[in-house]
Amino acid sequence: MRQLLALVLLACATLLLPGAPANAAGGRLLWQDHLDLAGGEDVARAVAAGNGRVVAVGSAQNAAGNNDFIVRTYDAKTGRLLWQDLVDVAGGDDAATAVVLHDDRVFVVGRGMDATGGPRLLLRAYNAKSGKLAWEDRSPLATIDGLAMAGAHVVVVGTTTDIAGNSRLAVRAYVAKTGVLGWQDQPAPPPGYTQFSGASRGVATQGQRVFVAGTVRTAPGGIGPTCLVRSYVSGNGRLEWESIHLPPSPCGAMAIAAARKHVIVAAVGGAALDDFLVQSYDAVTGHFLWEDRTFVSTAFDNEAVAVDIEARRAFVAGWVLWLPGTSNQEAFLVRAYDTDSGILRWEDQFPSPQQCICNAHDIVVDHGRVIAVGHAAPPGAWVVRAYDAKRGDLVWSDSFAPVGGTGSNAFAIQGARAVAADGGRVFVVGSGINASGNADFIVRTYDAK
């Protein structure tokens, strides 16, 4: 994945500022927060909103130089910090990677490093009002690839390693109220495959079903990767179906969403896994329905990385080579599909006026508005774009530009990473290099109209 150039932000300490209009059509900035915990690299990685609260999670570098798992909860209207939690498991690098809100609970999942240097799941359930820890789990998992609510359960998806050293899918469903493990599954890859790798947003729920996406292959780095989707009954973990569609070219799953009769997978495709690819499956049977590719396979990192669904439309975000044969020119790409037929209803390809690396990293649809977020570099800026879901018209946009300065690991940590929408507001999180040269944990909140 191409990463963006350094962003430089105005503040290096926690700061709440009044906003200015993104443009005349709407998208007014209501409040923002910049956190510099201890002069190190602080990164917001995921966000959720509901019941008058917004929760941003990620990692923050402490005074000792290692990264802590961080949770920050705000009043959604004013931006006032309500509570914060920092977790340092054993002096290693820890990070929160996903968050969901449900009733009076906040569930946050991420990775922790134990005293031996081994990776661990770190799942924590908080009282949403007070931030008091209700329960947690620190089971060993190799990777963490998703978090979702499914009825009375909170579901975590990741990977584990079997005794032969092969990577396997791991699904764990906890009773949301108590943290008791309700059910789990660690299946072997299908016949003919030996390895499983998770999608970056690898779990979705709909009704009484949990859908998990990932990629199976013959061996690490081997030929023939293909997308795999599994459907479970949320209450007891019974497997309803498993689908492996073998398209004309390979497939690597990146994200999954579900609504009504459809499961949509955002993926990479092509012989080099370098093309923007979308696949659709029947939610009840697992039958393959349709797929779409941009057919810009160039070994230049074209990717579909995020998906959301509303009102029989699937919205997929990522990026694609904008001008074939032109180096260093990627377009921020959003596509809208009819979920039944796969017909492309509209798309937006947004490059900067200069040659740029313009990538969309997350997308959400809420009450007829589609909001996609990412970056454009150069000049090095967050990008927020809001569309009419039906027509694809750009309703408003914002570009959060740098003001100067760089960081040594700018390519790995800069940009708008995630977005959520609730109560007429849009919440965008990410990070950027501040004037001191280190990265701030950033939350920006807009009027969604």
Image: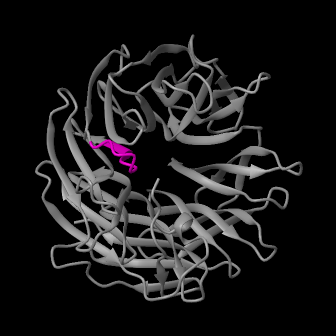
100 left or right, relative to 258 = right
417 left or right, relative to 81 = left
| Image x and y of residue 48, in percent | 47, 55
| Image x and y of residue 310, in percent | 26, 41
Q: Pick the residue in front: 345 or 364.
A: 345
* In the image, residue 303 lies in the stretch drawn in magenta: yes
The quarter holding residue 220 reads top right
254 left or right, relative to 104 = left
| Image x and y of residue 53, in percent | 48, 62
Extreme residue toward the right, this view: 116
Where is 4 relative to 116, above or below?
Answer: below
> Which residue does the image show at 44% across and 78% down from the upper left?
32
Q: What residue span does the magenta drawing correspond to? A: 296-308
Where is 23 relative to 260, above or below?
Answer: below
| Image x and y of residue 156, in percent | 60, 37
Extreme residue toward the front, this view: 325
> Which residue does the image show at 18% across and 50% down from the upper left?
347
In which quadrant will I find the C terminus?
A: bottom left
